[in-house]
Amino acid sequence: MSAEVKRIFSGEHHFSPFLREKLVPFFQYDHLDIVDIDLILRVSYSDKGIAGNVSPVCTENLKVYLNEHDISDEIRLELIDAARLVPEPLFNSQYKLGVQKYTEQFDALSIKEVERSGDADFFANYLATSSLPDFFESLGDRRVGWGGNLHALCYVYSFIAIQPISIRNCWKRYVETHGLDLPDELDGLPRIVISFSHHEAPSYGQVNPADSWPAGIVHYQLEVSYKNPLEPKLREIARRIRQFNILLEAQRLNYLDPLKDESDEILLEMQQAQASLKADLEKVQRAIAEIG
C-alpha cells in the first residue's frame, strides 16, 4: 500500500488592474514525483472595488491554468461532480446559510442596501429554478446577486462541504477532450505551475483591459501528494518480513512433524494396551461367573 508524502500550499490573491494573476510554481527538482494535487478553491469580495469606487465586488470568470493550459472548464466540471455527491437538500441548506450570513453582515454594516435590495428575491428564484450546472456555469459571475456575491463559488469549502478537486483528474479530462499528444499524468510534465487569473492570464494570452475590471479575492489550498522516497525500501522490508514468516512456519512444521509421529505411536500402543487389558478383564469375569 502506497504511503504518499503530503505538502500543503495555501494562500489568497487580491485581484486588481495590475495584479490580474497569481502563479504557484512547484519545485523543479521534485515535481516528477507528484502523484496528484487536490485543490480547494473559492472566491470572495475585496474592498478595493472597481475604478476607485470602494465596493465589495467579487471575482468573476476566474481562470485556472496548469502551465499554459486553461483547465477552467475541467475545474468547473469537477466542481459539479463533487457537488452531486452532496444530497440536494443539504447542498441547498448550506448554500442558503452562507448567503444568510453574508446578508446579515452587510445589513449590520449598512453596505449598499439599495443595490442589494433585490438580492433576497433573486436568490430565492435562482435557487428554485437552477440546477448544479447552472450554479457553476462559470467560476464567478457578477450577475449572480449584487457584485456577484451570491455565486456558489463564494460558499464552497466554507459553507458548502464538497470534496477537493483533483488536478490530476482535470488534466486527464483536458488531454482527452482536446485530443492532445501530451502525458496524461502530472509526473510526465516538464514543469508544473498552477495559475489563477481574473479572465485570461497575461502570462498565457492577450488581455483586453476593457473586457473586465479585476477585483475580488481568490482563496486556494493545494494539497500535493508526492511519491514516498522511502517506499522502495519499505516494500523491500515488507518482502523480507513475509519471507521470514514463511521460513518460521516451515521450521515450525519441521519441528512438530517428528513429535506428531512419535505421539501417534504412543497413542496407538496405549490403545492396544487398553484393548488387551479389557480382554483380560472379560476373561476374569467369565471365570468368576463359572465358579459361582
Image: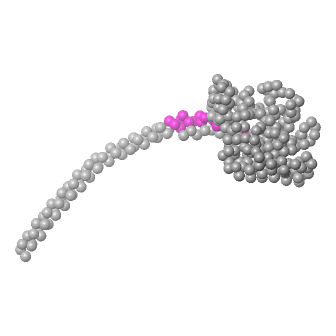
Left or right of 192 on screen, residue 211: right
Residue 22 located left or right of residue 87 = right
- From where the camera sits, is residue 2 visible? yes
Above or below: residue 239 compared with residue 98: above
Q: Quadrant of the N terminus?
A: top right
Q: Which residue is at a point 63% across and 26% down the rendered structure image?
A: 183
Q: Is residue 213 above or below residue 162?
A: above
| Residue 25 in view here | no
Residue found at the very far left of the displayed protein: 291
**Camera-side residue of 104 and 48:** 104
Display coloring: one colour
Along the line of sight, the residue nearer the viewer: 191 or 180: 180
Give the total number of marks visible in the rendering: 0
| Left or right, 11 with reference to 265 | right
Image position, residue 184 (x, y; %): 63, 29
Q: Position of residue 283 (x, y in %)?
A: 10, 66
Question: In the rendered image of this protein, does residue 242 appear above or below residue 288?
Answer: above
Residue 250 on image: x %, y %: 36, 42
Based on the picture, tell me whether residue 223 belongs to the magenta stretch.
Answer: yes
> The C terminus appears in which quarter of the rendering?
bottom left
Residue at the far top in the pictured view: 181
Q: Residue at x 66, y 46 (%)?
A: 85
Q: Name the residue at the front extreme.
A: 129
Is residue 48 toward the left or the right of residue 97 in the image?
right
Q: Which residues are magenta?
A: 221-236
Percent x, y of residue 123: 81, 48
Q: Residue at x 50, y 38 (%)?
A: 237
Residue at point 59%, 36% (across, down): 228
The front one of 252 and 228 is 228
Q: Is residue 88 magenta?
A: no
